[in-house]
Every structure is written in structure tokens, then in C-alpha cells.
Image (cartoon, rainbow, N blue to C red):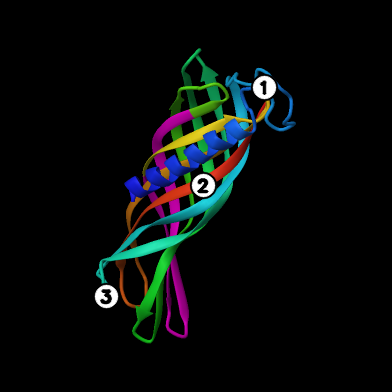
């Protein structure tokens, strides 16, 4: 999953560089109103933005209904805020984000359906990057929080929720379009660990949520 996410991000990175070249990002003309060659490559400051993407991974259940490990997928949409400090050739910063999500799976249960998913998650991460002109590849690592839910629908629907805690790590590419506006592509691996879901009609189950997310976003620097 991690290698797949990095490969997808690498493809996005290559495309971004190709588009930058086509748009004469670093050229001395003003043919593009969006991608201006003015000195935008100053990263210090607070920023906030929105992002969205797709997640895929593994949901584990114990005791299993059919299999202990099941493929999960879904979408995420949310917002982020952070601070960068440009140290001249190296940028350090921190970022927090909160995502509304629907990443999970369903399978048949005797007389109905069993569904386990992540309804929302957030991260608090350190970021470190190396600017190359107006483009900055970066790495990021930190802690993660999520709210999961398990639903058993056998004609009468019963849902239990639990809080998950874990860690996250990833890579990304951010590109400055203007002095204040930047675009980004990012891959995160999120491990939310396991939690017990009690009081289900079929009995207590331990559910684990682990997934990768590839997403795109836009930030505004204040």
C-alpha cells in the first residue's frame, strides 16, 4: 500500500513538473496569469486550506465474520492549517488537518449486513521540505486520531462508535502559484490501530483501521 501510494504521488509530481515547464513557470515572461515568475518562493508564515482525495487500505475484524482482513476504500474531504519556517534552502513546519471521511467495507452477516468504516480522522504532523524554485517536495510524520463506526443491520440497525489513535507518515509536493496561493498533492499512510466495539447484537468485536490516502489541496498563506 505504501509503495503504491508513493508511486502514484511520483506520477503526480512528474506531471506537475511537466506542466510547470509548459507554463514557463521559471521563465522570464508573463504569459501565465496564474503561474507568475515573481518571487513567490518565500515559505515562512501561517497558512490554511482545503483538501480532498481517496483512501484505500485494510480493515481487520476479530472475531472474523468470514476473513480477519478486508479491503477498504472510500473518500475524504477536509481542511488543514499550519506554519512554515523558511530557513534558506530548507523548510520546517507543522500542520494539523481534520477530514470528514467514508473509508470502510461491508460484508454479509447472518440475516443482514456488517459495515465497519472510518467516519472522520485528523492528524498533527511535522513537515520538512527542500524548495526547488517555487516547488517543494516534503516529508511528513506525526500522530493520528479517528472516529470509527460499526453497524450491524439485520432488519434492526445497531451502530457502535469508538475513538482510534495511531500514527501517520507520508510525502508530498507543494507548488506556489502566487505569493499567497499554493497547490499540493500528498500521500499519507494512516494507522489508527485497533479498538473494541461492544454491545453489538452479534457480540463484541475488535476492529482495526489502516489505510493510505492520496489527496490534492490548495493553501492560502497569510
Q: Residue at x 71, y 33 (%)?
A: 34
Q: Nearer the viewer, mark 3 or mark 2?
A: 2
Q: Residue at x 50, y 13 (%)?
A: 87
Name the side, left or right, on which 206 lies relative to 18.
left
Name the side, left or right, on which 166 lies relative to 155.
left
* Contact, mark 1 vs mark 2 (Cβ under 8 Å): no
Q: Residue at x 45, y 49 (%)?
A: 213
Circle 3: element type: loop
Q: Position of residue 140 (x, y in %)?
A: 42, 33
Circle 2: element type: strand
Q: Position of residue 159 (x, y in %)?
A: 45, 70
Residue that numbered label 1 is attached to: 37
* Magenta span of residues: 137-166
Number of residues whose C-alpha sits closer than 10 Å to that of mark 3, classed few (under 14), some (14–19) or many (20 or more): few
Magenta segment, principal secondary structure?
Answer: strand
* Of callouts 1 and 3, the N-terminal one: 1
Q: Position of residue 222 (x, y in %)?
A: 67, 26
Above/below status of 97 relative to 91: below
Decide if residue 73 is in sight here: yes
* Of callouts 3 and 2, the N-terminal one: 3
The numbered dot on residue 66 is 3
Number of residues whose C-alpha sits closer than 10 Å to that of mark 2, classed few (under 14), some (14–19) or many (20 or more): many
Name the side, left or right, on which 65 lies relative to 133.
left
Residue that numbered label 2 is attached to: 215
Amino acid at each position: 500500500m505504501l509503495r503504491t501510494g508513493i508511486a502514484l504521488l511520483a506520477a503526480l509530481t512528474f506531471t506537475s513538473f511537466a506542466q510547470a515547464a509548459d507554463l514557463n513557470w521559471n521563465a522570464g515572461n508573463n504569459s501565465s496569469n496564474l503561474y507568475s515568475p515573481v518571487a513567490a518562493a518565500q515559505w515562512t508564515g501561517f497558512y490554511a486550506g482545503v483538501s480532498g482525495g481517496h483512501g484505500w487500505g485494510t480493515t481487520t475484524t476479530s472475531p472474523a465474520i468470514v476473513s480477519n482482513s478486508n479491503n477498504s476504500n472510500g473518500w475524504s474531504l477536509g481542511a488543514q492549517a499550519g506554519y512554515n519556517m523558511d530557513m534558506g534552502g530548507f523548510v520546517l513546519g507543522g500542520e494539523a488537518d481534520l477530514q470528514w471521511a467514508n473509508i470502510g467495507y461491508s460484508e454479509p452477516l447472518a440475516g443482514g449486513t456488517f459495515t465497519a468504516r472510518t467516519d472522520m480522522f485528523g492528524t498533527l504532523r511535522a513537515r520538512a521540505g527542500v524548495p526547488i524554485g517555487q516547488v517543494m517536495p516534503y516529508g511528513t510524520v506525526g500522530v493520528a486520531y479517528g472516529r470509527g463506526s460499526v453497524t450491524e443491520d439485520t432488519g434492526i440497525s445497531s451502530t457502535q462508535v469508538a475513538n482510534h489513535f495511531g500514527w501517520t507518515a507520508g510525502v508530498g509536493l507543494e507548488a506556489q502559484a502566487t505569493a499567497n496561493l499554493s497547490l499540493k498533492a500528498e500521500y499519507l499512510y494512516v494507522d489508527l490501530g485497533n479498538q473494541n466495539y461492544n454491545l453489538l447484537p452479534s457480540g463484541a468485536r475488535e476492529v482495526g483501521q489502516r489505510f493510505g490516502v492520496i489527496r490534492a489541496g490548495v493553501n492560502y498563506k497569510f
